[in-house]
């Protein structure tokens, strides 16, 4: 595993990449805009981050790409002029448009979520969060000895339906559609949807989790290029090009991008 160069320490290099191009900024929510917390419903954006996002969004297109439901993350951010991609990009919306990928699948996912909630109700510290296209089983507060049981229940529930698969994340197992769709494909789709998929635009993606690696890879392989910034305090194999040590560093980078645009 290799430590990525800091986006702040290497800002002059990043600024040169931005010069003469229009930034399009994509932001994960949990672990990026908001610190990770024990209970997902308690997550919130610190005020410096909120101000930085508002300032940047007044200058360039900004999209929030989250594993949360689109309505949930939009309410958490509270900025109606942004683009929001919920459920890892299965539910997209912004000023003047709304799109859903595989709209026939949410009823099945919700039934699976209800079954898992019933099966795991007596496992302390486990929370099943239905998110329409995905069912997240959080085990951050569970005992380590109970995690294999939780994993088995989730894998068994998904295996009963060929339309579904299990994905992992930070202290969460997630049941999701077995489709060739992820945050990376959602980002590329949004760039095209917004008419910003040409060489004049430079997409910048900030994220912290395994699911964000799909977006880092998509931008790295994009003909016009892109910038991936991993928000984490430990080195890891990543398709991102830069890093930030924690969500506390995010507003400074966003302000620098805004300054570069000015």
Image (cartoon, helix red, strand yellow):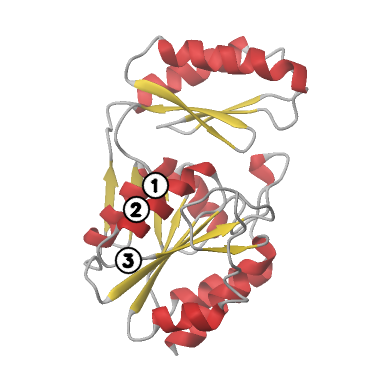
Q: In the picture, residue 83 is in which quadrant?
A: bottom left
The answer to whether mark 2 and mark 1 are in CB contact below 8 A is: yes
Q: In the picture, residue 193 is in which quadrant?
A: bottom left
Q: Residue at x 49, y 80 (%)?
A: 13
> In the figure, 17 relative to 206: above or below?
below
Residue bearing the label numbered 3: 225
1 vs 3, front mark: 3
Q: Can residue 259 be seen in this view?
A: yes
Residue bearing the label numbered 1: 183
Left or right, 214 with respect to 232, comes to: left
2 vs 1, front mark: 2
N-terminal of the pair, mark 3 or mark 2, is 2
Mark 2 surroundings within 10 Å by alpha-carbon count, few (fewer than 14), some (14 through 19), many (20 or more):
many
Residue bearing the label numbered 2: 218
Q: Distance between the residues labelled 3 and 2?
A: 9 Å
The answer to whether mark 1 and mark 3 are in CB contact below 8 A is: no
> In the figure, 197 relative to 171: above or below?
below
Left or right, 105 with respect to 258, comes to: left
Q: Which of 99 and 222 is in front in this view?
A: 222
Q: Where is residue 169 in the image (x, y as percent from the top left)?
A: 56, 36
Q: Where is residue 136 in the image (x, y as percent from the top left)?
A: 54, 30
Q: Distance between the residues labelled 1 and 3?
A: 16 Å
N-terminal of the pair, mark 1 or mark 3, is 1
Helix, strand or loop under label 3: loop
Q: In the picture, residue 45 is in which quadrant?
A: bottom right
Helix, strand or loop under label 2: helix
Helix, strand or loop under label 1: helix
Direction bottom: furthest residue: 262
Q: Can residue 71 be seen in this view?
A: no
The answer to whether mark 3 and mark 2 are in CB contact below 8 A is: no
N-terminal of the pair, mark 2 or mark 1, is 1
């Amino acid at each position: 595993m290799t430590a990525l160069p800091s986006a702040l320490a290497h800002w002059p290099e990043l600024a040169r990449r931005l010069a003469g191009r229009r930034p399009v900024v994509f932001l994960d929510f949990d672990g990026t805009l908001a610190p990770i917390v024990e209970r997902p419903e308690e997550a919130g954006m610190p005020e410096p981050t909120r101000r930085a996002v508002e300032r940047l969004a007044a200058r360039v297109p900004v999209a929030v790409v989250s594993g949360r439901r689109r309505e949930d993350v939009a309410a958490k951010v509270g900025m109606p002029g942004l683009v929001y991609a919920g459920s890892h990009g299965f539910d997209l919306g912004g000023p003047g448009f709304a799109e859903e990928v595989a709209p026939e699948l949410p009823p099945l996912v919700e039934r699976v979520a209800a079954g898992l909630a019933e099966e795991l109700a007596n496992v302390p510290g486990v929370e099943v969060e239905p998110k329409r296209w995905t069912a997240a089983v959080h085990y951050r507060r569970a005992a380590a000895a109970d995690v294999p049981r939780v994993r088995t229940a989730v894998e068994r529930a998904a295996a009963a339906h060929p339309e579904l698969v299990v994905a992992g994340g930070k202290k969460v197992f997630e049941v999701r559609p077995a489709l060739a769709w992820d945050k990376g494909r959602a980002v590329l789709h949004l760039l095209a949807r917004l008419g910003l998929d040409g060489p004049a635009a430079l997409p910048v993606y900030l994220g912290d989790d395994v699911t964000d690696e799909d977006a880092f890879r998509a931008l790295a392989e994009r003909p016009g290029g892109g910038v991936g910034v991993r928000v984490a305090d430990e080195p890891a194999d990543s398709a991102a090009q830069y890093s930030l040590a924690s969500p506390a560093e995010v507003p400074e980078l966003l302000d620098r991008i805004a300054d570069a645009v000015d």
